[in-house]
């Protein structure tokens, strides 16, 4: 079954600008490689002892970060009006009920790792699934964009960028 989607000129302009900005800021690949300026921070674990064969994608790093953030201490109260407002706006933006860029607005409004942790836990409690699961079905934003916005929530430990290392063998 074919669907006809009508776009205004401003919709098309906005989509093209977003794609260009994402490509310029995050590159076109799904995974980030060592030496990428965004990864040259203490938050990331660069194990230089082995050669990395495959790198984690931005989706995998986001999932790992979300998992670790959900368990941090000192979270903001999940019943806080701001937290509840954020989770409703996140959910509505993925359902198409909010503005098209509300997802990125909410993620940029969250300032601390404790707030992000509360948002992740409150979202799961309210909607019965994780924010990551809902983001997986969101096709209007790339994982590179999401990772670019959430990686700032350094939870105190490192996230490795390498998925699989080459094994080193030594001859005796």
Image (tube, helix red, strand yellow):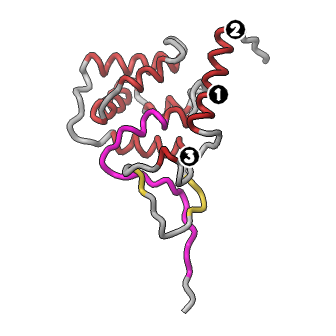
Tag count = 3
Earlier in the chain: of badge 1 and badge 2, it is: 2
Task: Tell me the distance, in whole angstroms, between the alpha carbons under discs 3 and 2.
Answer: 33 Å
10 Å crowding of disc 2: few (<14), some (14-19), many (20+)? few
Left or right? Give the position of 137 relative to 104.
right
Q: In this picture, which residue range is highlighted in magenta?
A: 147-169
Q: Quadrant of the N terminus?
A: top right
Q: Which residue is mark 3?
A: 57
Q: Mark 3 near mark 2, Cβ–Cβ under 8 Å? A: no
Residue 127 percent location from the top left of the image: 40, 24
Residue sitting nearer the eye, 164 or 4: 164
Q: Quadrant of the C terminus?
A: bottom right
Q: Which residue is mark 2?
A: 9
Q: Which residue is mark 1?
A: 20
10 Å crowding of disc 3: few (<14), some (14-19), many (20+)? many
User: Vertical placement of 13 versus 68: above or below?
Assistant: above
User: Vertical placement of 28 versus 134: above or below?
Assistant: below
Q: Nearer the viewer, mark 3 or mark 2?
A: 2
Residue 18 percent location from the top left of the image: 60, 23
| Secondary element at image label 1 | helix
Left or right? Give the position of 31 relative to 132.
right
Earlier in the chain: of badge 3 and badge 1, it is: 1
Residue 37 percent location from the top left of the image: 50, 46
Residue 11 within the magenta-colored segment of the rendering = no
């Amino acid at each position: 079954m074919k669907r006809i989607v009508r776009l205004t000129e401003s919709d098309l302009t906005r989509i093209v600008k977003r794609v260009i900005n994402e490509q310029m800021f995050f590159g076109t690949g799904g995974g980030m490689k060592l030496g990428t300026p965004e990864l040259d921070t203490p938050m990331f674990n660069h194990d230089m002892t082995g050669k990395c064969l495959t790198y984690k994608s931005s989706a995998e790093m986001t999932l790992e970060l979300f998992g670790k953030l959900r368990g941090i201490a000192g979270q903001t109260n999940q019943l806080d009006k701001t937290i509840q407002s954020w989770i409703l706006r996140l959910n509505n933006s993925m359902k198409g009920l909010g503005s098209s860029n509300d997802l990125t607005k909410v993620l940029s409004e969250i300032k601390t790792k404790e707030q992000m942790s509360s948002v992740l836990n409150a979202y799961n409690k309210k909607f019965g699934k994780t924010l990551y699961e809902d983001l997986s079905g969101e096709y209007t934003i790339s994982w590179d964009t999401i990772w670019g916005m959430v990686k700032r929530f350094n939870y105190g430990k490192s996230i490795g960028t390498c998925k699989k290392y080459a094994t080193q063998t030594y001859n005796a």
